């Protein structure tokens, strides 16, 4: 059983989720190594994290000194071999089963400590599929964060039939005691708790717009003003990324075969058109360079 406190974290992927997870780990005083597949993506990921830290400072959540300390704890690499000494790795790449299983197979070979935890931030892919890409599925677990990661306090913890109880305890302690997140536990079913409830709601909102039932603006306004949601479902779909919403819907549809999980044609066309939401500058809304809806 591993008792050493986690101080060396690896994050695979520096997109909006990976960047957010890396930022939260660095703010929690761990040494963070972030992997991206190219130098350019490392640079882009670093800039995104710096912008978020700046936002933390300007909104009074972080001091200048804390920001500088967090920056000093972050390093980037495009060689997964550099993860050899990591004690806890969180994978947060694109929601694609083939890509994720390849990464878990690589991590399994590279991360030397047999007690190291290999966690996935997948939104919907059953964790067992990732565990079985390794030689030791006992050290694989789901650790699902929410966007924006520095702001939303939840982590869903997903253990499989194979996850060892020690790994589950260490992942929970890391999420709660080190990162300061609240933990809920979910069975290893596609979508876990939050997306199994959230994604059918987002898809229903898209179908509502598609059928001419109500406009994008009115659907969002209705849920913000009528139900006190912080943002409406279409703006939230843009924030999550329409490609990600589609990928989650596909996984859940494959798992449960329920029509309510099937992505509607309008979502498919928008993804094909590259209108992926906030990160692409256009989704249900257009976005300015700084990410605000125009
Ligand atoms: N670091 C620290 N704090 C930050 C920050 C950062 N980088 N960015 C913002 N904040 C803080 C602000 O200081 C503010 O705190 P306060 O309420 O104490 O003043 C708070 O976060 C809200 O920020 P803003 O006032 O700048 O922005 P808004 O009020 O417009 O809120 C929002 C933006 C946080 C995105 C809010 O609209 C929201 O929570 N929306 C819902 C998001 C949601 O549902 N996410 C889950 C998506 S599902 C998912 O991620 C799972 C995946 O698998 C799909």
Image: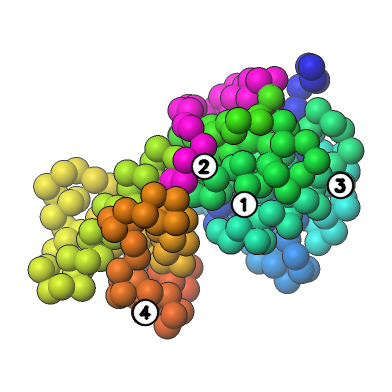
- In primary-sequence order, the first of circles 4 and 1 is 1
For disc 3, the marked residue is 109
**Disc 4 crowd, CA 10 A, few/some/many (<14, 14-19, 20+):** few
Label of residue 145 in the image: 2
Under tag 4, what secondary structure?
A: helix
For disc 4, the marked residue is 269
Comparing labels 4 and 2, the label whose residue is closer to the camera = 4
Quarter of the view holding residue 214 = bottom left
Residue beneath the point at 59% across and 42% down: 127
Under tag 2, what secondary structure?
A: strand
Residue beneath the point at 63% across and 35% down: 141
The x, y position of residue 240, in whole percent, is 43, 58
Q: Is mark 4 within 8 Å of ligand 1?
A: no
- In primary-sequence order, the first of circles 3 and 2 is 3
The x, y position of residue 207, in whole percent, is 22, 66
Q: Is residue 103 above or below residue 212?
A: above
Q: Is residue 221 left or right of residue 175?
A: left
Under tag 3, what secondary structure?
A: helix
Q: Alpha-carbon distance for marks 1 and 3?
A: 18 Å
- In primary-sequence order, the first of circles 1 and 2 is 1
The stretch of residues the image draws in magenta is 165-191
Q: Is mark 2 within 8 Å of ligand 1?
A: yes
**Disc 2 crowd, CA 10 A, few/some/many (<14, 14-19, 20+):** many
């Amino acid at each position: 059983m591993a008792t050493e406190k986690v101080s060396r974290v690896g994050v695979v992927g520096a997109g909006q989720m990976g960047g957010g997870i890396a930022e939260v780990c660095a703010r929690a005083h761990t040494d963070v190594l972030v992997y991206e597949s190219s130098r350019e993506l490392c640079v882009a990921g670093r800039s995104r994290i710096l912008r978020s830290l700046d936002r933390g400072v300007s909104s009074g959540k972080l001091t200048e000194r804390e920001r500088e300390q967090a920056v000093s704890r972050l390093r980037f690499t495009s060689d997964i071999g550099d993860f050899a000494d990591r004690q806890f790795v969180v994978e947060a790449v694109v929601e694609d089963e083939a890509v994720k299983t390849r990464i878990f197979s690589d991590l399994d070979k590279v991360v030397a400590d047999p007690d190291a935890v290999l966690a996935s931030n997948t939104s919907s892919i059953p964790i067992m599929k990732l565990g079985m890409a390794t030689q030791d599925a006992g050290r694989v677990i789901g650790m699902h964060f929410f966007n924006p990661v520095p702001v939303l306090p939840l982590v869903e913890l997903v253990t499989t039939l194979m996850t060892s109880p020690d790994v589950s305890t260490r992942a929970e302690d890391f999420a709660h005691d080190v990162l300061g997140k609240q933990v809920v536990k979910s069975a290893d079913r596609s979508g876990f708790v939050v997306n199994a409830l959230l994604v059918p709601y987002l898809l229903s909102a898209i179908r509502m717009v598609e059928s001419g039932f109500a406009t994008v603006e009115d659907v969002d306004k209705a849920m913000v003003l009528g139900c006190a949601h912080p943002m409406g479902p279409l703006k939230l779909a843009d924030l999550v990324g329409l490609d990600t919403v589609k990928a989650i819907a596909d996984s859940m549809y494959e798992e449960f075969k329920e029509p309510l999980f099937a992505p509607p044609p309008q979502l498919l066309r928008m993804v094909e058109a590259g209108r992926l939401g906030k990160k692409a500058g256009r989704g249900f809304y257009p976005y300015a360079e700084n990410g605000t809806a125009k």
